């Protein structure tokens, strides 16, 4: 169960009588707030538990019963106790998981409301001219949403295409654009839809980067798309809001619609980890079958086609470049200046964080207005670059790309080895389920590391009974993402200016060359947090209590003084961290769901701990008063995946140890390619999206010409 609360009610308002009084008193004690605020938060809590997470109700009821029992031991009801006595009851429950979860959700519900922001000095951001207000202070620029006539409906789908691309995110969007531009007739199938930018630019609770446990607007939502997780505690059935589900946004543009847009290149050492470090016991560390020079021309192509802002230099591990970046860096605010001072004191090198965000107007889209709602949100002024506002409209503008949203690929069609025949589709149309087979000369998979692997396994046929490309049991193995190291700190003075997106300064000194470690990672300042995220930072770091006046006042005092530095640790991967088909659980269309298992390697936890220590050292040198390193990941918490999920269709030169050849072709099938991060042998110590895009561009060129380019000199 996620770290969020569970509560009881059968109506949309606070239940009457003693139960209502108990709930009201509990919320007032947690928040130390006026009665009217407690009533509003309590009503929202009732609504969440009735409409979104009813399975939390029993545990929340049990918590309230425990609270009332402790009050009875004092000879009273909880509601009738004085303020100090009620707080004492909650302090006795501090080690109770349900109590912590309840307090966190109540805090989230309170701080997601704009009425709570003023006292923290938090604002969503600047307005943009010619824009419409969303209702939370953010304005959405005209043109930020896709025109409906750019999207197809099931009756418009033809029987045959040159290429079917599955998934519209970083890999699929780039591949669809380049193939359509070259003259191929492309059907791009996207499982999700197009939520309005206003919906994706305002909700702090159902943001894919929030930790509330509520299903994100980026999809999927509800109980029709479960996954199962196998850990030491046994199997669990999860829904998209649960962290172990490992959500990656499912909508047009995929994760690029709402990501943080850090656009790092992998460095040369990232492609030869096994050669540099050896293979740790119990790991599946390996070299890529290609190197940095194989990708450099495509890094350059994507950076200039889509538009990356930044200032190359300062990364001692960076590979050579064809040229610089098309836009200058956005620049940092006051906390970046403080961190720069700390880095100089330590002798650390620093660099500007490269971002797929317009620092100047470009390609008909506005420059970033530096709002405080970036990561996890759609950009209200369309300054954040993703495939949704570049590759997809470019592809449809050719007249040769049909984009079909709201449709799932059930299986890749094949009856023999060597070639696939097309895909089987399922979706909803005119109030009913429709199914259809579409044939294609080429099929390109870009559904994310979990779903690409699941689809390959679910497409088994008589000649390949274990799944497509799975003759050596490699499909779904090596699931990885990024374990994050870092630290949270508070300063004596206000250093947070809420100048978005947030990451502007980083050190790459620790990407490699760390004695006794395998790899490493970069460290950068965190994205501007929402008020709810700020509270969670402070509570989880031990800087403020979870409830009561001290928690309220601590948040008010420290919200503009708390800074977090974080970075992704390069993982060494294991064969046991994997995706399989669950033998019994089915999705809403009757298809087997992904079953996730395994965990991170001990070397990954060591690297995480190292990065956390270096982040703490940096913050200390910057003048922080109190510092809390991030906790080391538990060994049995499940596999690493999430937004940076990768590795499940590993590319290689040997079918015995990989799923695809060096050009993304699934072994045994000439016309089936993978273009997402499933290919990644290792995932770098930086955000991987630019590598996904560059890899997709390279594979698309190979589809079209049978050749690829390589940096020379």
Image: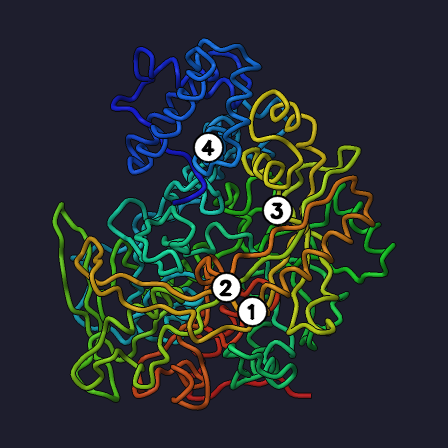
Pointer 3: what residue? 527
Pointer 2 and pointer 1: residues touching (CB < 8 Å)? yes
Nearest-to-viewer mark from 4 and 2: 4
| Tag count | 4
Pointer 4 and pointer 1: residues touching (CB < 8 Å)? no
Q: Would you call the spot at circle 1 few (<14 residues within 10 Å), some (14-19), or many (20 or more)?
A: many
Nearest-to-viewer mark from 3 and 2: 2
Nearest-to-viewer mark from 3 and 4: 4
Pointer 4: what residue? 99
Q: Earlier in the sequence, mark 4 or mark 2?
A: 4
Q: Which of marks 3 and 2 is nearer the N terminus?
A: 2
Residue at 59% in and 40% down = 540
How far apart marks 4 and 1 lie (CA) works out to: 34 Å
Q: Would you call the spot at circle 2 few (<14 residues within 10 Å), some (14-19), or many (20 or more)?
A: many
Q: Which of marks 2 and 1 is nearer the N terminus?
A: 2
Pointer 4 and pointer 2: residues touching (CB < 8 Å)? no
Location of residue 556 by image quarter? top right
Side (left or right) of 652 relative to 616: left
> Where does residue 399 sit, x and y in percent of width and height?
32, 64
Is residue 473 at least partly visible in the picture?
yes
Kind of element beneath mark 3: loop
Colour setup of the view = rainbow
Residue at 50% in and 79% down = 284
How far apart marks 3 and 4 lie (CA) works out to: 28 Å
Q: Is residue 418 above or below residue 606?
A: below
Nearest-to-viewer mark from 4 and 1: 4
Pointer 1: what residue? 571
Q: Which of marks 1 and 3 is nearer the N terminus?
A: 3
How far apart marks 4 and 2 lie (CA) works out to: 30 Å
How far apart marks 3 and 2 lie (CA) works out to: 19 Å
Pointer 2: what residue? 481
């Amino acid at each position: 169960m996620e770290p969020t609360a569970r509560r009881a009610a059968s109506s949309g308002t606070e239940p009457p009588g003693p139960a209502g009084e108990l709930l009201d008193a509990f919320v007032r004690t947690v928040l130390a707030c006026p009665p009217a605020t407690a009533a509003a938060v309590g009503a929202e809590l009732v609504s969440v538990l009735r409409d979104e997470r009813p399975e939390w109700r029993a545990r929340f009821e049990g918590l309230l019963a425990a609270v009332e029992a402790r009050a009875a031991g004092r000879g009273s009801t909880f509601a009738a106790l004085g303020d100090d006595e009620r707080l004492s009851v909650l302090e006795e429950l501090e080690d109770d998981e349900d109590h912590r979860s309840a307090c966190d959700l109540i805090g989230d519900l309170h701080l997601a409301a704009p009425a709570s922001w003023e006292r923290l000095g938090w604002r969503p951001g600047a307005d943009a001219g010619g824009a419409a207000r969303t209702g939370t202070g953010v304005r959405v620029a005209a043109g930020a949403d896709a025109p409906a006539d750019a999207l197809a409906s099931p009756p418009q789908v033809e029987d045959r295409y040159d290429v079917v691309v599955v998934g519209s995110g970083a890999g699929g969007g780039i591949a669809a654009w380049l193939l359509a531009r070259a003259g191929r007739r492309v059907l791009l199938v996207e499982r999700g839809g197009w939520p309005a930018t206003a919906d994706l630019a305002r909700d702090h609770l159902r943001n894919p980067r929030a930790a509330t446990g509520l299903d994100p607007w980026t999809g999927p939502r509800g109980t029709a798309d479960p996954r199962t997780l196998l850990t030491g505690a046994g199997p669990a059935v999860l829904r998209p809001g649960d962290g172990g589900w490992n959500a990656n946004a499912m909508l047009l543009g995929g994760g690029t619609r709402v990501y943080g847009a850090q656009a790092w290149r992998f460095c040369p050492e990232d492609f030869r980890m096994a050669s540099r470090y050896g293979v740790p016991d119990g790991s599946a560390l390996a070299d890529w079958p290609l190197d940095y020079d194989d990708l450099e021309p495509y890094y350059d192509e994507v950076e200039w086609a889509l538009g990356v802002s930044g200032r190359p230099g300062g990364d001692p591990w960076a590979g050579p470049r064809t040229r610089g970046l098309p836009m200058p860096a956005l620049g940092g605010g006051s906390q970046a200046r403080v961190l720069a001072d700390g880095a100089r004191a330590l002798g650390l090198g620093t660099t500007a964080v490269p971002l797929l965000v317009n620092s100047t107007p470009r390609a008909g889209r506005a420059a970033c207005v530096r709002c405080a709602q970036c990561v996890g949100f759609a950009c209200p002024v369309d300054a954040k670059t993703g495939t949704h506002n570049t590759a997809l409209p470019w592809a449809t503008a050719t007249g040769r790309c049909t984009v079909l949203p709201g449709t799932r690929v059930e299986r890749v069609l094949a009856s023999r080895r060597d070639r696939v025949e097309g895909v089987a589709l399922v979706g909803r149309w005119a109030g009913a389920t429709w199914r259809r087979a579409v044939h294609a000369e080429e099929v390109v998979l870009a559904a994310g590391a979990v779903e690409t692997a699941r689809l390959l396994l679910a497409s088994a046929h008589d000649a390949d009974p274990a799944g497509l490309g799975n003759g050596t049991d490699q499909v779904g193995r090596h699931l990885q993402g990024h374990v994050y190291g870092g630290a949270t700190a508070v300063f004596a003075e206000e250093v947070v200016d809420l100048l978005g997106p947030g990451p502007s300064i980083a050190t790459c000194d620790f990407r490699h060359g760390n004695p006794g470690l395998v790899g490493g990672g970069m460290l950068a300042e965190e994205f501007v947090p929402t008020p709810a995220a700020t509270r969670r930072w402070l509570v989880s770091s031990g800087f403020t209590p979870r409830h009561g006046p001290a928690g309220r006042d601590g948040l008010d005092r420290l919200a503009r003084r708390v800074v977090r530095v974080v970075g992704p640790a390069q993982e060494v991967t294991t064969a046991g961290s994997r995706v399989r088909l669950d033998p019994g659980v089915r999705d809403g269309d009757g298809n087997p769901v992904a079953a996730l298992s395994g965990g991170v390697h001990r070397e990954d936890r060591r690297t995480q701990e190292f990065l956390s220590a270096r982040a703490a050292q940096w913050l200390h040198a910057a003048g922080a008063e109190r510092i809390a390193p991030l906790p080391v990941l538990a060994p049995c918490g499940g596999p690493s995946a999430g937004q940076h999920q990768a590795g499940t269709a590993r590319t290689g030169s040997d079918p015995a140890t990989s799923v695809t050849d060096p050009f993304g072709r699934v072994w045994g099938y000439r016309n089936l390619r993978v273009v997402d991060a499933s290919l990644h042998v290792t995932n770098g110590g930086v955000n991987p999206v630019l590598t996904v895009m560059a890899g997709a561009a390279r594979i698309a060129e190979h589809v079209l010409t049978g050749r690829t380019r390589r940096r020379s000199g």
